[in-house]
Amino acid sequence: MIIIIEGRPGSGKTTCCKHLMEILKKDKNLHFCGFYTSEMRNASGERIGFEIITTSGERAILADVREFSPYQIGKYFVRVENIEKIVVPILSKFIDEDFNILIIDEVGKMEMLSSKFKELLGTIINKNPGTIICTMPPVDFDVMLSLIRRKANKIFKLETQRKNALQIAEQIYRVIKEDLPSTGEY
């Protein structure tokens, strides 16, 4: 099953994922892995980058305004090597190990700069080995996003500033539980 959480920047996609992860941690029948991205801000509150945080607690800088990289999206220099060091192993774990839910926050322009990320994501989407929950922008800037959208079983749209992010996370959890085999476990 593929579930998309769609929204513009600041709509609450990450808030939704983090809340969903908290809910999933309480359910001993569900085994999930994944990552979310968090904004990095300076002392005056200005956004200066993004950090990757995995469900196992690993952290790495995704992009920032300070350290040069050959990859740039807007004012941010993207650290593709960190995507490949932190995120790609999570995608591999989902394929190879005993996880039935994968959370990806987000399938965005920065993440898609990694050919390894893109290739593994394509494998996962085509095999559909469990429940895949991913956040995406409302516009498909890459063929991969179009593929995910076509194969999605459910799309949840966040329209306003985080107002319904917590409710959407709870709805997604209910959808996951309804999709479970009669044993209550994947």
Image (cartoon, rainbow, N blue to C red):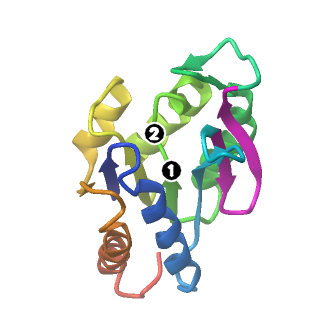
Residue marked by disc 1: 104
Q: Where, by quadrant of the figure, is residue 149 drawn?
A: top left
Say left or right for 14 vs 12: right
Quick check: marks 1 and 2 in contact, CB under 8 Å?
yes
Residue 121 percent coordinates (x, y): 49, 38
Residue marked by disc 2: 107
Looking at the image, which residue is at 72% across and 47% down? 43
- Please rate how many residues cluster around mark 1, counting C-alpha atoms within 10 Å: few if below 14, some from 14 to 19, many from 20: many
Looking at the image, which residue is at 31% across and 69% down? 168
Residue 130 percent coordinates (x, y): 44, 60
Q: Where, by quadrant of the figure, is residue 132 drawn?
A: bottom left
Q: Main secondary structure of the magenta part?
A: strand
User: How many dots with numbers?
Assistant: 2
**Residue 119, magenta (yes or no):** no
- SS at mark 2 in the image: loop
Looking at the image, which residue is at 74% across and 28% down? 81
**Residue 61, magenta (yes or no):** yes
Q: Tag 2: residue type?
A: Val
Read off the magenta span.
Answer: 49-65
Measured in 3D between alpha carbons, the distance from the residue under mark 1 to the one under mark 2, in whole angstroms, is 7 Å
10 relative to 75, above or below? below
136 relative to 118, above or below? below
Say left or right for 64 vs 31: right
Q: Where, by quadrant of the figure, is residue 97 drawn?
A: bottom right
Q: Tag 1: residue type?
A: Ile
135 relative to 130, above or below? above
